[in-house]
Amino acid sequence: MATDFKPHGPVTPWRVSIERLQLQTMGKKDKHYALGLTVLFLAVGAFTASHHEMWRDEIQAWLLARDSTSIFNLFANLKYEGHPGLWHLCLMPLSRITHSPVMMQMLHLLITGVTVYLFVRYSPFNWFQKLLFCFGYFVIYEYAIVARNYALGLLLITVFCVLFKERYKRFISVGCVLFLLAHTSVHALIVTIAIGIALCCEYLVGGRFFESLNQEIEAIKNKRPIWIGFALIGIGIITAVLQLNPPPDTGFAVAWNFNFEVKRVNNIVKLISRAYFPVTIPTRSFWGSNILITSAFFQAIQVLLCYFLMLFSMLLFFKRPTALLTYLISTFGLLAFFYVKYHGSIRHHGFLFLTFLMCCWIYRDSPAISFGQTEQQDTDSLIDRVFNMAGTVLVTVLLICHALGGITAIRMEYRHIFSYGKLTAEYIKSQGMQDHPMVGESDFAASTVVGYLERPQQIYYPRGNRLGSFVRWDAARTHDASNQLVIEAAKTLSAQTNKEVLIILNRAIDNELREQHNLTTVVKFTGSTVGDEGFHLYLMPTP
């Protein structure tokens, strides 16, 4: 899948000098190529981000960081989120500088820009594959434009791959990276566990079977840094799991499914094709869509294709146990999580592909199995060449599909309104209504508007019966709030404050109910990519 520069012919001082010069020249070209692609990536990303209206999940993280009174309060609020808090900790200082969530977008894009540079500069893939990666769906859109915690996971996975070649010389650094990776998302935590197990098996068992690895380990006289690194990995995993332990009154994704159903297993396995071939449909509702699913032929072969991709990947990594074990534990761990706990969306499924790509990267520097049978060396070499060639073709085809999906997503982002939360907030401010008492339903949609009001603003959420900004995903908010209940809440708030109350809904109120309660229709914004983030504004008069 990747080739190294290797000298041929007798070694002389003249030849060594030439080869060293060639390596330096190659290094300079790689550096310049990495810088050029990163600049191009940031330019395209900045343009696209300027046309991206953030939705509730992005704004939720910002509101949590902005409106939590302390780090301890932040972690208490995070207990309902289902993710560790590294991303929110990064946002907290920014939220003290400005109340504008645009700062979060800038930080998020910069994180992915660093990832792109490191990938292009240090990964073993060829120049064309690196180009495709930079503008693939997950890199240019899902983990760059949609500002979530997953970009940090992608960056730290990339840093781990960069460090992997000299892991035993820099094992404390590896431990620190994996400690942080475990705190980015539950999906990255699963990948961290897989990497930790693979590295542990390689260190404890691998030296007995791989002479080169044993020599490398024995050459390290002081083993303390290695054990410190493993301790950091273990502490990272344990502390992340403790953060993810939900409180008793949690109200989001509370069910567990341990029943074995073949149909459900196959449906979960199909997620591999969504992650490996994210070719989006060029429509307003492009986000999370897949054009291949619209083909009857693809639907007929989808399950078999996914099993083939897993089998081929296992054969591809078979001679490198560290890469193979990382792939197996990560892939089956993610699929098990999707099956047992939470099905997830395309941004979660993307970690299936990141796992595959990560194992392709570390494959070269993982210890290889040598069967030691001279008469089979030519055959083994031929099989290796065939598999490497097939792996290169597969990676290229997959990255082409990702690039098609990424380009389509960028086009659709420019053409369509992603969420009307931003425009609704701008309208409220332009009409001088930002100081009105507010009632919002549904809470998860209305919170987007609150985030874009760019000031500490509390809104009354009938679903949950409380004032707040971010959504608290507890059992108190699981009941629906009807239009009648919303209106009654607005009446009560109006009587308490003796002010007009602004009602923010992501659905319309029928004419009869509006006339009955003397509501004034202010404006409506509908037709966004996120379908339930169009908004209707109504004004409740003072009593």
Image (cartoon, rainbow, N blue to C red):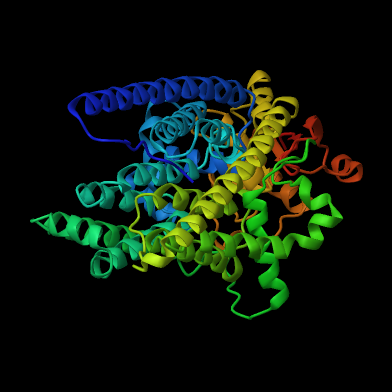
Please state if 519 lies on the left or on the right of 448 as rendered: right
Q: Residue at x 26, y 52 (%)?
A: 175
542 is higher (above) or lower (below) than 301: above
Query: In screen coordinates, is 418 left or right of 120?
Result: right
**Residue occupying image coordinates x 54% and y 59%:** 313
Does residue 455 appear left or right of residue 305 in this picture? left
Q: Where is residue 143, by image quadrant?
A: top right
Frontmost residue, 232 versus 67: 232
Residue 496 visible from this viewpoint: no
Residue placed furthest toward the bottom: 259
Residue 541 position within the rendered picture, expressed as x and y whole percent measured from the top left: 74, 34
Residue situated furthest left in the rendering: 221
Residue visible at 78% across and 35% down in the picture? 282
Residue 142 place in picture, x, y as percent: 59, 40
Number of residue marks: 0
Q: Residue 538: image x %, image y %?
A: 76, 35
Q: Nearer the viewer, residue 501 or 365?
A: 365
State whether residue 165 appears in this view: yes
Judged left or right of residue 467, residue 361 is left
> If the image is split into quadrants, where does the C terminus sit?
top right
Q: Position of residue 242 (x, y in %)?
A: 36, 64
Q: Using the image as rendered, state which of residue 147 and residue 463 is in the foreground.
A: 147
Front-most of residues 128 and 199: 128
